[in-house]
Structure formats: C-alpha cells, structure tokens
Amino acid sequence: MSFVKRNTVLSSPRTGLSPSTPQQQQTKQEKQLAPGLRPSPTDGRLTTSTGTASLDQLLAGHGGLPVGTCLLVEEQGTTDFSGILLRYYAAEGLVQGHQVHAVAFPPEWRHQLPGLASPDKKSKSSAPAPAPEEKMKIAWRYESLGNNAAAGASTRADSGAAFCHSFDLSKRLASSEAKGTLNPIPVGVAPSFGQRGVGIASPLKTILKQLKAKLEVSGPNAIHRLVVPSLLSPTLYPPGCAQPSEILQFMHGLRALLRQYSTQLTAIITFPTSLFPRSSGLVRWVEILCDGVVELIPLPARLGAAPPPPSGSDPKANEQPQGMFKVYTLPVYHEKGGGGAESGNFRENLSFSLSASRGLVIKPYSLPPMLEDEQEKPSAAAPKKDGLDF
C-alpha cells in the first residue's frame, strides 16, 4: 500500500527561481574564465593561444597551449623563426590582458611586437570560386591538404570571444591594443674570473625569484606568460649558465612553478641546437623537463634564388615552404591517449612558411601537383633528330 495521497497536485517551483539548464551552466563557466582562456576539447583543461593558429592545432588536440605547461622550440642555423614565434606569443598575451615576463629583453622590445592585422573583407568576398574542371585536375589528396589548412585558419574568427588574434609583421603593436603588462627580466652581467663564488647570485636563479614574486603578488585570476629566448646562448647569458648544475636547477625550478600555478602560468623557451646539439646529454635532459618539444629546420638558401615576395603579392608565392617542422614530444594527459595520436598530424612531414600578413603557417609538407598545362613542352627552336638513338 502507498501512503501518498492520490489526486494531489505536486507543488510548483517557487516564483523567481527557474531551474538552470545545461546551456546556462556553460555560459556561467565561460563568464568565470579569464580572457584568452578556454577549456580543452580533449579533457577540459584550460588552454591559451600561442598567437599562431596552426601551432595551436598541433598541441595534442587541445586547440592551444595548456596552462601550466612549457613548450621548447628548437631551431637550427642562424635564422630567427623561433624568435618570431615568441613575438606572436608575447603579442597575444598583451592583447588578451595577460602579464608577459620577457627574459633578457629591454623594455623597448614592446615596440618590436607585431600589431593586429586589419580585417580584409574585400579579399574574402571577391575571391572567385574555383571551377569544377580545375578541381578535377588536382589529385584528391592535394585538395584535402588545402581544406585542412583553411579549416585551421578559420578557427580564429569562428568563436565569439577572440581566442587567437591575427597579427601583421609589417605593423607594430599600439599601446591602445595592449591591455596587459610587459615585465622585462634582465639577465645581468657575467662576473669576472676573480669574482666568481663571492656572493653573486646566478642569473637563472634570479629569473625564478622575480617570476615567483610576481606570481605571489598577482591575484588568482591573473594569467602569466614567460618568454625565454635562445636559452644558453652566449650572446644573452653568461657562460656559467651552461653548466649542468645551473641549467638543470633552473628547469626543475620552472617546472615546479608551472605545477604550482597550473591555472595561471605558461612558458615558451627557444633553444639554439646549432650551438648545443640534441645528441648531447644536457640537451636531452632539458627536453625531458619540458612538456612539449618541437624543432624548426630552415631550408638552405639556393644560390641565385629570387628574393622573398612582398606581403601584397601572389598568396601562392608566400605559401612556399621555408623549412621543416618536427614534433618530438607532445603532452599526454589522460588514459585515452592524447598527445596528438588521435589526429596523427605530427607523424607526417610538416613544413612552415612565414609571411607578413598570414604569419607562420604550419602544414603537411607535399610536393606541388604538376598539371598537364604546366608540363614542359618541346620548343620549336630545338633541333629535330632524324632516326632513333640506341
């Protein structure tokens, strides 16, 4: 028998209190996030943009750099493509209102950061659609590569709040566009031979002390970005920093700060592999203490090659690869795999190209398709041979 009375009307909810729907709960969570952050589609971790949309797509499927992690960017040769990645990373942080800590850079480095690119609506509307006959001439696998690149570029403007801005290297970041603060951290002067060990603090330890002091003073909603250019380069750091006892303590201390402030701090470090090759044990330890490791290998310049085209020239000329992009380590965060194994893009041969308007674009490397019209035709001035050559 039931003790509940029948023919009774259940009490309606109180007026003024409406049940919260899942959509309303999601909007409340998004409002609580700091600007420039969004949850990862893989496991819900907070991520922030590196300022380069194609690099965000590669970072283990998170759509950005997870907060509380460090990315090591290695580069061969004397080029400075990794330095341009740092500029995009710092400019994105200043536009989003983050605190950017620049190591070994003067305060005037702020005027060298790229400015926001103006939206080009005419080029999008006036671009003619390719004819179906021209599509049939290209193999299906080449056409799919172009679609993937277009999909990666469209992630900048699809979201309501700007997560990754587009920058123009030919412009400079205006003070009205920068909402964050730039905190330069000087490395200091190398001590002389007779002054070593006389109470002089290590430059790498002072970096960690200043960074920790800024993190303790700031509130829990403040987002910090650490920029470390050309680690162990003799032009920026004293020779004593290359000692294993110095650099490994710095990497362990930085890793501890990243884990302690796992919702506030990210870091990108560039490393010259031409001075310190990857075959050395010191470099291998530095890679192990970083969450992600990538390498830029510029293609050698050919003798007699034409200079690079300007930014307003044919976009196909700017898409020519300028180097190879290798991915060695990506973070794995859950038992389902992670680390980019779902997409498998990092297993392919990747290349990068740099232009002033589009920035640094990373995409799978492939040879351009050869159409029938572009094949070499025998010239009329060429002498004709009679008979057959055996």
Image (spheres, rainbow, N blue to C red):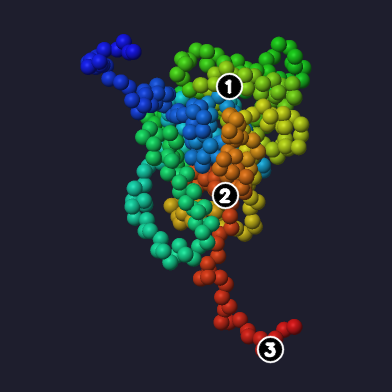
**Can residue 48 be seen in this snapshot?**
no
Mark sitting on residue 275: none
Q: Is residue 66 above or below residue 386?
A: above
Q: Residue 134 in the image: x percent, y percent?
A: 45, 65
Q: If the image is split into quadrants, where does the C terminus sit?
A: bottom right
Question: Disc 3 vs disc 2: Cβ atoms closer than 8 Å?
Answer: no
Please rate how many residues cluster around mark 3, counting C-alpha atoms within 10 Å: few if below 14, some from 14 to 19, many from 20: few
Q: Nearer the viewer, residue 21 or 369?
A: 21
Q: How far apart are marks 1 and 3 (CA)?
A: 76 Å
**Can residue 246 be seen in this snapshot?**
yes
Amino acid type of the residue tagged 3 in the rendering: Gly
Question: Disc 1 vs disc 3: Cβ atoms closer than 8 Å?
Answer: no
Going 56% across and 59% down the picture, which residue do you hit? 368
Identify the element where label 3 is drawn. Answer: loop
Residue indicated by mark 2: 364
Q: Residue 109 in the image: x percent, y percent?
A: 51, 30
Identify the element where label 2 is drawn. Answer: strand
Q: Distance between the residues labelled 1 and 2?
A: 31 Å
For marks 1 and 2 on the same chain, the one whose residue lies earlier in the sequence: 1
Residue indicated by mark 1: 258
Q: Nearer the viewer, residue 272 or 26?
A: 26
- Extreme bottom residue here? 386
Q: Distance between the residues labelled 3 and 2?
A: 46 Å
Going 22% across and 17% down the picture, which residue do you hit? 7
Relative to 276, 218 lies left or right: left
Q: If the image is split into quadrants, where does the N terminus sit?
A: top left
Going 37% across and 30% down the picture, which residue do you hit? 176
Residue indicated by mark 3: 387
Amino acid type of the residue tagged 2 in the rendering: Pro
For marks 1 and 3 on the same chain, the one whose residue lies earlier in the sequence: 1
